[in-house]
Amino acid sequence: MMLTRTLRSQCAMPALGLGTWPIKGPKCIDLVRTGLESGFRLIDTAQMYTNEVSTGMGIAQSGVNRHDIFLTTKVVGCNQGKLTRESVEMSLERLGTDYLDLILIHWPNPSLGRAEATWETLANVREEGLTMSIGLSNFSLTQYDALVDATGVEADVNQVQIDPWARQSELVDGLLERGVMPQAWGPLGTRAARHNTELDWSVLETVAARHGVSPHAIALADQLGRGFATVVRSSNPEHQLANLKALEIELTDQDKADLAGMAQETVHLYDSTVEEEF
Ligand SMILES: NC(=O)c1ccc[n+]([C@@H]2O[C@H](COP(=O)([O-])OP(=O)(O)OC[C@H]3O[C@@H](n4cnc5c(N)ncnc54)[C@H](OP(=O)(O)O)[C@@H]3O)[C@@H](O)[C@H]2O)c1
């Protein structure tokens, strides 16, 4: 039985999910199929990833019942505003399904100024039953509060960048206080490479040695232990199984203290007031 988080919508979302960015085509079909065969039950895609068709094919090939899978997609910047509703229908068609479990606004894109209209459309799309839950991605607390003030619509989830070197405690606490489930993207810190930041895995390795698991599983177990959700990507079935071990790890108080004390290297954090994706 997969650990789940109960969202504001009362839907149960698997706490540990499988990411698909930036894998496309046959490699994405294989990633999704093997991930589901390994035991993942949340698949995270996005219009921007141009892999919704292969994600749908991977789901079909896995033989796992669609209703046993929590499927997330995201509205890309160029589909914000008047195109949002049609883009959701196109996502459904590409994914080969008649509903989504969760649709997110992928980035706030402040210079575009269409987040409010997009958010109201997603609330309507949920009313119509095309998605069970709606959420955001890469919204700061300030951006979240402004959106809710303007629309009166609260979110089920905010998918944000969190990893062992950027624990984002203030953001996590603020979202949980608002009843929004944080979901980590990039939970292994791989985006640090874009700043040539060398990450120090030694604490994760020390804790991993105590439990006889991979340091990657420790990073995920720590995120789960902090009470939120996380999506990790692997195309390698052995890594997929190793990551699922995170669900079985019981971190000790010493482990938690060691992980919480890791040096923070937040230089690789994206800033959604200036970073935009269309
Ligand atoms: N909302 C957003 O703006 C946003 C942004 C970025 C990502 N995302 C979502 O979040 C998901 C996860 O983030 P991410 O893909 O950027 O990074 P990630 O999951 O932190 O890291 C993925 C990398 O870690 C490796 N890896 C995974 N498990 C491993 C293991 N057990 N041992 C060794 N290496 C391992 C993978 O290689 P192998 O394939 O070889 O295992 C891959 O290179 C994405 O796929 C996407 O769905 C969302």
Image (cartoon, helix red, strand yellow):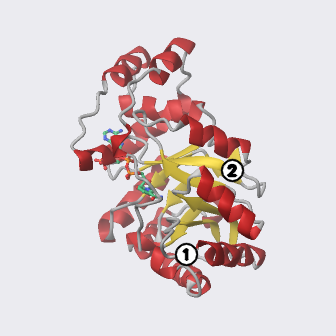
Q: Which residue is mark 1?
A: 113
Is the CB–ligand 1 distance for label 2 below 8 Å? no
Residue 271 in the image: x percent, y percent? 43, 53
At label 1, counting other C-alpha atoms closer than 10 Å, the crowd grade (few under 14, some 14-19, many 20 or more) is few
Quarter of the rendering occupied by the C terminus: bottom left
Drawn side of residue 260 relative to residue 198, left or right: right
Measuring 52% from the left and 64% from the top, which residue is drawn there?
63
Dot label at residue 180: 2
Percent x, y of residue 41: 56, 53
Amino acid residing under circle 2:
Val
Q: Is residue 244 above or below residue 123?
A: above
Quadrant for residue 49, please give it.
bottom left
* Horizontal relation, residue 124 to residue 230: left or right: right
Q: Which residue type carries mark 1?
A: Gly
Question: Residue at the top extreme?
Answer: 254
Of residue 189 and residue 89, the one placed in the foreground of this image is: 189
